[in-house]
Image (cartoon, rainbow, N blue to C red):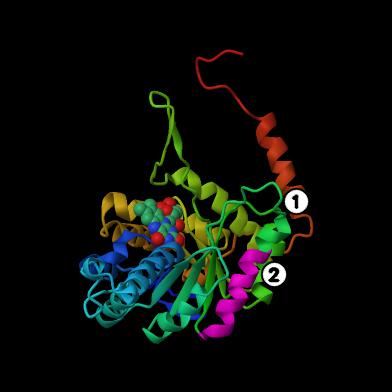
């Protein structure tokens, strides 16, 4: 019998497949279906800093106007007895998930500024979160902001959250750091228990007719696995913290490659959104079959066995393979040049 267990953020999981933050966790029935399909843990959709701020501002406005005692305006006041903030709704969903699921639940905080919201981590911990994923979804779009300042933003938020909770923290990162291994080491030193690689940045398109920017959310494709494989393989032996792979996993083969490169867990979102929760059991069954056929006894044996190891000259190895692929390019059939 193949041993599929893995350790993520210091938590033992029955297998490496974990649905990542997405609307799938908004619905209790869907979460239960994911557990039934074999999910080993569940990352909740994010609680966004901006949602909380908007709500705070709205409450302030109502309360100030209320105190001024404008008769008609008073009728617009929310009923404080029934008013439920985004935070309350999130905590309630977390409690529901904890009540109905046996698998660990990871809460997700998503924001970029330092003023106060990360302290909500305490409430998530008290509501039963087994860990927190902190997603600092930040685009460095200011020519005056240095790379170090971008990194400091992540580290400051991590430090603040680390000081206020005792459960493990995973940082969800973008691929756009000048020296990812150095940055991951910094996060490890500051108390992160893991990193999730990588955030996908949703890229607006241009509508040529209207000449306007159009928000577009494209689900991922398996091509996105390659970027993750590269960085997992580079990072695996340079850090002791957990590595989660997120992006492009649709099949057992995608998941197996992530593990071979060095992931401790493999996240799925787009494939489950596209094909439904049952997709997870197909990926799991395919992994198990492949491992049996290839005589792997455990996920432990598989994990990181194709990382770049402790090679001193990783950059040279990567550069050599870059030159090799360029030099061996052949045009597609029927194309002459
Ligand atoms: C519809 C949708 C909603 C998402 N919501 C969140 C979110 O709330 N917080 C977050 O950190 N990531 C969120 N993500 C990103 C996913 O968790 C995941 O990291 C990303 O989609 C890459 O994985 P995939 O290729 O398996 O989709 C969302 C993705 C999708 C498609």
Residues drawn in magenta: 152-166
Q: Please, what is the dominant secondary structure of the magenta stretch?
A: helix
Instruction: Give the crowd class for mark 2: few <14, some 14-19, many >=20 residues within 10 Å.
Output: some
The residue that mark 1 highlights is 315
Q: Considering the numbered disc 1 on the image, is that residue within a helix, a strand or a loop?
A: helix
In the rendered image, the quadrant that contains the C terminus is top right
> Is residue 251 at all visible to an observer of this figure?
no
The residue that mark 2 highlights is 186
Give the answer, above or below, for where 290 lies relative to 79. above
Q: Report the mark closest to the observer, 2 or 1.
A: 2
Question: Residue 321, how many percent across, how many down?
Answer: 69, 42
Tell me which residue sits at (59%, 59%) in the image.
232
The answer to whether residue 246 is left or right of residue 239 is left
In the rendered image, the quadrant that contains the N terminus is bottom left
Front residue of 51 and 165 = 51
The part of the image, by quadrant, that contains residue 283 is bottom left
Tell me which residue sits at (52%, 22%) in the image.
332
The answer to whether residue 256 is left or right of residue 181 is left
């Amino acid at each position: 019998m193949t041993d599929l267990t893995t350790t993520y953020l210091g938590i033992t999981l029955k297998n490496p497949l974990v649905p990542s933050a997405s609307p799938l966790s908004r619905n209790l029935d869907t979460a239960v279906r994911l557990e039934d399909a074999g999910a080993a843990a569940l990352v909740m959709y994010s609680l966004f800093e901006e949602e909380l701020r908007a709500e705070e501002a709205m409450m302030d406005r109502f309360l100030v106007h209320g105190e001024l005692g404008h008769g008609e305006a008073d009728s617009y006041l929310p009923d404080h007895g029934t008013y439920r903030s985004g935070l309350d709704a999130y905590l309630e969903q977390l409690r529901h998930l904890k009540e109905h699921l046996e698998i660990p639940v990871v809460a997700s905080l998503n924001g970029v500024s330092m003023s106060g919201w990360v302290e909500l981590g305490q409430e998530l911990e008290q509501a039963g979160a087994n860990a927190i994923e902190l997603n600092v979804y930040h685009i460095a779009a200011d020519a005056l902001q240095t790379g170090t300042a971008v990194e400091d933003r992540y580290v400051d938020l991590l430090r603040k959250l680390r000081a206020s909770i005792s459960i493990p923290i995973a940082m969800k990162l973008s691929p756009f750091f000048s020296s990812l291994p150095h940055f991951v080491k910094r996060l490890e030193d500051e108390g992160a228990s893991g990193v999730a690689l990588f955030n996908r940045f949703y890229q607006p398109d241009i509508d040529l007719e209207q000449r306007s920017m159009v928000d577009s959310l494209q689900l991922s494709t398996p091509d996105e696995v390659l970027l993750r494989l590269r960085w997992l393989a580079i990072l695996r032996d340079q850090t002791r913290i957990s590595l989660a792979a997120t992006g492009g996993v649709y099949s057992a083969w995608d998941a197996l490659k992530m593990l071979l490169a060095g992931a401790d867990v493999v996240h799925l979102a787009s494939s489950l959104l596209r094909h439904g929760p049952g997709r997870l059991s197909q990926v799991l069954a395919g992994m198990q079959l492949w491992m049996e056929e290839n005589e792997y006894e455990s996920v432990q044996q598989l994990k990181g066995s194709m990382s770049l190891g402790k090679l001193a000259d990783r950059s040279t190895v990567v550069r050599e393979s870059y030159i090799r692929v360029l030099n061996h390019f052949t045009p597609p059939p029927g194309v002459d040049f």
